[in-house]
Image: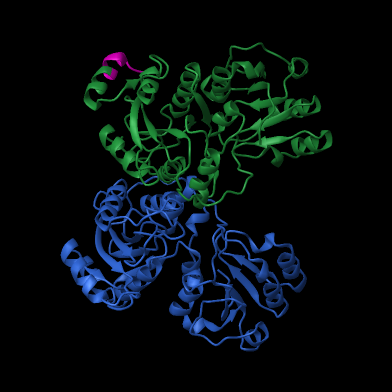
Chain colours: A blue, B green
Amino acid sequence: MSLRTPYLLFAGDAPDDLAAKTAHGVCDWRPEWCVGQLRLDGCRAALDLPEMTIAEGAAAGAKTLVIGVANRGGVVGDTWIAPLVEALEAGLDIASGLHVRLSDVPEIRDTAETVGRALFDVRHPTRVFALGTGEARAGKRLLTVGTDASVGKMYTSLAIEREMRRRGMKADFRATGQTGIFVAGDGVSVDAVVSDFVSGAVEWLCPENDPDHWDVVEGQGSLFHPSFAGVSLGLIHGAQADALVLCHEPTRTNMRGLPNQPLPDITDCIRMNEATARLTNPEARVVGVAVNTHAMDDGLAYLKNLEARLSLPCVDSVATGVAPIVDALA
Amino acid sequence: MSLRTPYLLFAGDAPDDLAAKTAHGVCDWRPEWCVGQLRLDGCRAALDLPEMTIAEGAAAGAKTLVIGVANRGGVVGDTWIAPLVEALEAGLDIASGLHVRLSDVPEIRDTAETVGRALFDVRHPTRVFALGTGEARAGKRLLTVGTDASVGKMYTSLAIEREMRRRGMKADFRATGQTGIFVAGDGVSVDAVVSDFVSGAVEWLCPENDPDHWDVVEGQGSLFHPSFAGVSLGLIHGAQADALVLCHEPTRTNMRGLPNQPLPDITDCIRMNEATARLTNPEARVVGVAVNTHAMDDGLAYLKNLEARLSLPCVDSVATGVAPIVDALA
């Protein structure tokens, strides 16, 4: 991938920090690549970065404007067009993980052509994938799964990769979403792959490897999310994971984006993920739970109770770290 | 999309009837839409329709030439181009379920533009779909699911629609694959939809309806097929089915295309389909099993034993008809 660094992170008009999770992810895992943030009127997300205009970002050395905000449907907001055009005119490339292509917006496409800057639509696969086969392959794989979408699967995956490498284990984070791709420099945005080829794309993403090598595969969605469960299942079958780590956010009252859809019971969720994963890896099992306790007063107590209930290591990837989960794999 | 009827069915140079199974499917289920068949030199498939030249088909009122033959690679055969151009010049549209787009063949594209006729590549969705929501909607829906791919889901769906209509019930077949789309005149080829939008595409395909109206939705793949399970799950969640009919082919020794992948146990398959379907319709249940007994000597005995074991109506959509399943819905 030829993304030029450093980045100016575009938070747009994100209504909350969750909507800017791409910007937060890049900022948290690659702070050395981020010179500042650009926020529009009404933006309620805030990164731990200097606020900059495009001119200031360019002056600070930014080479690429990374669209760090997602909205439902993945379109370019009307109010984004003028600043994106300005960024191109200031000499920045633009990288986007939106469903809609930057080049589908005439003003952006025409300006990029005129000023000779690049548009990177990282969500759109440029490769052709084969159908998945489910054939057993060498190497070990860990996949993060979730009770819901946006519950920390990428963070947990990156934390596990970091912890494994700290211990001298062979480990590679495998990105399946836009933020992960910005952080990893490669990957496949599986939710943009034609549905027939999702499991095949994931088999390509984490191919056979050394017997003691771990691919840590970023999960997507949830088997219990009516919008995304098909993507999650294709990912589970393609990953052929030995180990699953369930990610959870206990304060969520409904599935993300769906006010009337309740969260699944956590043991039902473990059971369903294991049952489906065993189609392509009969040894697959949930080895731990990563809970985002950020919004809780009693996060540590919650983890302790959950651990007693499930007899599995239960951690917060940020607050406690993932060492107990990596212990369980060793 | 809505294809113009009636059709002239193009059997091309099909080496046998299996290669023309799309044409056979359309002819079997919509004979009233088929004015004739067009066969090229060497064609060994034969439909129960008058043989016609393009001029004769046009004179008989055909509005669309339907490509009812598949070949290796899903491409337009070299010998097909001249007759397809002739069809356009005679005033027919062309509909194709091939992998390659008709408009990728310069002679066909240019002629269609010149004479102002339409090319329908039904495998390639032209609409933009919203994300699925799982929100409850009025109307009743039945979805066919399978122990494997290619076990008779389309035929069973069409047989159920026919039986429901025969009884005066309000029922519409909803097509999710290429042959089904030719039969229905419209539909969505769900395995070609970008994975994020599969459940939303299916919600679009079978929207809210009268409380006593049945949409009979054509299933795809199987939750137990490592290549396609994600497509199947998105379809299950989008269909929000009240009733599931499991389709099965007992002589299959492995999952289609995957020599090392065993068939699932039929009760496991029922349980998993019900468990996943209940995410978007808590009342979802398997109401019957449709078995393709064509290759069996003792098909009726098999059905009787299975019925006793499952306590569900077990039929062969062709040999016994689907009346017992429709009885169970009334």
Image x and y of residue B92, in percent = 75, 26
Q: Quadrant of the C terminus of chain B?
A: top left
Relative to B139, B184 lies left or right: right
Image x and y of residue B133, in percent = 48, 51
Relative to A237, A37 lies left or right: right
| Residue extending farthest front | B211
The magenta region covers B295-303
- Viewer-proximal residue, B57 or B70? B57
Q: Please name the residue shown 80% across and 24% down the image.
A: B90
- Viewer-proximal residue, B260 or A302? A302
Residue A257's place in the image compared with A319, above or below, is above
Q: Please name the residue shown 48% across and 28% down the image.
A: B154
Q: Quadrant of the N terminus of chain B?
A: top right
Relative to A294, A191 lies left or right: right
Image x and y of residue A55, in percent = 68, 85
Residue A255's place in the image compared with A9, above or below, is above
Residue A252, image quadrant? bottom left
- Viewer-proximal residue, B159 or B118? B159
